[in-house]
Amino acid sequence: MSSLVESLEHALSPPAMNSDLLKKFKLGTVNQHAGPLIIGVAGGSASGKTSVCKVIEGMMNRSATVVALDSFYHDLTEEQKLNPSAVNYDHPEMFDFDALIEVVQGLRRGEAVQVPVYDYVTSSRVEYTTVPPADIVLIEGIFVLLHEELRDLFDLKIFVDTDSDERLARRIERDIAERGRTVQSVLTQYRQTVKPAHDDFIQPTMRNADVIVPRGVDNKSALDMIVSYLQFVVLQHSGMNSPAVSHAQLPSMNHGYNGHL
Ligand SMILES: Nc1ncnc2c1ncn2[C@@H]1O[C@H](COP(=O)(O)OP(=O)(O)O)[C@@H](O)[C@H]1O
Ligand SMILES: O=c1ccn([C@@H]2O[C@H](COP(=O)(O)O)[C@@H](O)[C@H]2O)c(=O)[nH]1
């Protein structure tokens, strides 16, 4: 145990892991509640939140599931429906946080939950899907570290920190390929709402994170450390080990992830 704590302390330079989390980790009190570990993953648009979640999900040797804040956009008003491309999708009031909190609480109780499926092309909820319970629940979205009640449900808070020029480049490619946009529409939306929201609401939530992951999935060391940490906490939580579990009992750092999705 102490060797793991020491290696985490040395490997993660501040502010990568905050001292509160390290303290809880040392005391073995990260996850005090029954049920799965709930992890919030925030970051700017196209920072790599979804990709980071998918990699963590794939590396865990326990069941894991990902729920996106974007599934919880409110329905557009009749007026907004007349011109959906003029809507500001980057304001916290656009989301139904209460519905997301209910879903997180259900998963925390070990229940299957109904989650909306959002269509970015039509900016609407198209159906619902059943998400089964899992040992690890990842909640990703631009504002997941902003909303206090939601934030308080997380056992670990991660912020994916990717340069804004790289995020814009990715957003242009992704939104044209997957979300029915043009270069011009992506640039206009970025200037009018995406960048201001990032500066005003999203970037400041980095201070609420326990762990900051620069460069997203390119940061293989950070993902290895997060997964080892989660395996350890799940083991501790499931009573398979005492808090004095030794480093040697930890799952291997090599989970077969080679840096590619
Ligand atoms: N490290 C990376 N290098 C290159 N492209 C990436 C990287 N991470 C994510 N992407 C791509 O960038 C886009 C946005 O990534 P995604 O994980 O969906 O971000 P977010 O969930 O933060 O919007 C996707 O098309 C994804 O394939
Ligand atoms: O109808 C919509 C809904 C959302 N958006 C944009 O999506 C991003 C958030 O998703 P990420 O996967 O985190 O990028 C947000 O910045 C909205 O601008 C949209 O364009 N249309």
Image (cartoon, grey):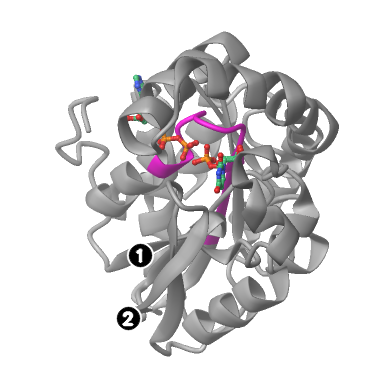
Which of the 4 image quadrants contains residue 260? top left
| Stretch of the chain drawn in magenta | 39-50
Between 260 and 12, the residue placed more toward the observer is 260
Q: Is residue 148 above or below residue 22?
A: below
Q: Is residue 234 above or below residue 115?
A: above
Q: CA distance from mark 2 to mark 1?
A: 8 Å
Find residue 118 and name its label: none
Q: Secondary structure at mark 2?
A: loop
In the rendering, at what x and y percent does residue 79 appear? 74, 58
Whether residue 17 appears in this view of the structure is yes
Ligand 2 quadrant? Answer: top right
- Name the residue tied to disc 1: 65
Find residue 132 and name its label: 2
Q: Is residue 118 magenta?
A: no
Q: Respond yes or no on whether mark 1 lies under 8 Å from ligand 1.
A: no
Rendered residue at 14%/37% (across/down): 256
Which of the 4 image quadrants contains residue 261? top left
In the rendering, at what x and y percent does residue 70 appear? 54, 55
Under mark 2, the amino acid is Pro
**Who comes first in sequence, dot 2 or dot 1?**
1
Under mark 1, the amino acid is Thr
Whether residue 236 appears in this view of the structure is no
Q: Is residue 137 left or right of residue 75?
A: left
Between 215 and 77, the residue placed more toward the observer is 77
Rendered residue at 37%/72% (across/down): 135
